Image: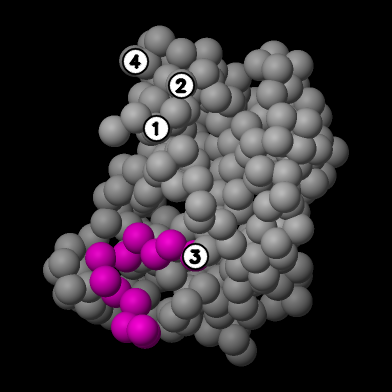
């Protein structure tokens, strides 16, 4: 399928591992020039080098925290200086701690807002003017199935990621006239290190073996398995492509049918 993405510039946040890395790889496979960022410089550099060598494409990688607004600004400026544009921006960040409400703290709430909401604001604020100049752009937020169906013991995610959906819808409404499409993808239970952390947390709290927890998550979805990071990445590439040119302001779940609503 022709995606029309060859030579586009794709920014992918938190892309040293997991869903972000799979997304960066998927864009590189389409011939995009890729800009990657993450906090861990060593892990990020290794991921960037592998993508650069495997797909023979230009990759810019910078290590910083996506909750640092000036760092996001400087990164986007560096991307535009190197590649000439910022066509696609995938916002992403690690998930907040798994807790029930009474175990939460005010400081952790503030951190969750900064990490999972404000980071998306920072990136959108920086890339939209560049997209407006070209009358073409794609902003895609990676959130969670929690935007549609709350998950037990993920109260931070349940609350904060819903705000990202409001941001996505607002940006889609305001900047559609500029050729900028803004969407959200919500993964279900996907085989990443983040899911392993959640399994460990639940196992410690309940005494249930981690393997049984994984099996239970898989059984919750009609497809009876966990998702793979590449499956979410393929959905993001499609949303960024010319094949999805009339889709904006939407939340697309990549959850194997886990969401039970209509």
- Determine whether the residue tagged by mark 3 lies in a helix, strand or loop: strand
Tell us which disc is closer to us: 1 or 3: 1
**Image x and y of residue 141, in percent:** 57, 53
What residue sits right under mark 2 in the picture?
A: 6
Q: Is residue 166 left or right of residue 213?
A: right
**Disc 3 crowd, CA 10 A, few/some/many (<14, 14-19, 20+):** many
Q: Residue at x 25, y 65 (%)?
A: 256
Q: Residues within 10 Å of mark 2 (few under 14, many from 20)?
A: some
User: Under tag 4, what secondary structure?
Assistant: helix
Of 173 and 201, which appears nearest the observer? 173
Q: Earlier in the sequence, mark 1 or mark 4?
A: 1
Q: Earlier in the sequence, mark 4 or mark 3?
A: 4
The N terminus sits in image quarter = top left
Q: Which residue is mark 4?
A: 54
Could you tell which of marks 1 and 3 lies nearer the N-terminus? 1
Please report contact status of discs 1 and 4: CB closer than 8 Å, yes or no.
Answer: no
| SS at badge 1 | loop
Residue 17 sits in quarter: top left
Residue closer to the observer: 250 or 83: 250
Q: Can you identify the residue that label 1 sits on?
A: 3
Residue that label 3 marks: 251
The mark nearer the N terminus, 3 or 2, is 2
What stretch of residues is rendered in magenta?
251-262
């Amino acid at each position: 399928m022709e995606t029309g993405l060859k030579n586009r510039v794709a920014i992918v946040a938190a892309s040293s591992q997991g869903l972000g890395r799979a997304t960066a790889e998927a864009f590189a496979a389409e011939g995009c020039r890729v800009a990657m960022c993450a906090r861990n410089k060593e892990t990020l550099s290794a991921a960037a080098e592998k993508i650069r060598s495997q797909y023979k494409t230009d990759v810019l990688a910078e290590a910083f925290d996506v909750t640092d607004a000036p760092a996001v600004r400087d990164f986007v400026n560096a991307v535009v200086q190197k590649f000439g544009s910022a066509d696609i921006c995938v916002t992403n960040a690690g998930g907040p701690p798994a807790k029930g409400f009474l175990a939460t703290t005010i400081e952790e709430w503030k951190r969750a807002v900064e990490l999972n909401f404000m980071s998306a604001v920072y990136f959108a604020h920086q890339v939209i003017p560049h997209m407006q100049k070209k009358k073409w752009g794609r902003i895609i937020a990676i959130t969670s199935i929690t935007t549609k169906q709350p998950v037990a013991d993920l109260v931070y995610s349940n609350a904060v990621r819903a705000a990202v959906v409001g941001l996505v819808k607002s940006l889609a409404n305001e900047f559609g006239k500029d050729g900028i499409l803004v969407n959200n993808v919500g993964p279900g239970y996907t085989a990443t290190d983040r899911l392993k952390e959640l399994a460990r947390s639940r196992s410690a709290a309940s005494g249930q073996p981690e393997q049984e927890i994984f099996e239970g998550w898989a059984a919750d979805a009609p497809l009876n398995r966990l998702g793979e990071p590449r499956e979410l990445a393929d959905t993001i590439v499609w949303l960024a492509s010319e094949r999805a040119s009339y889709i904006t302001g939407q939340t697309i779940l990549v959850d194997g049918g886990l969401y039970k609503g209509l």
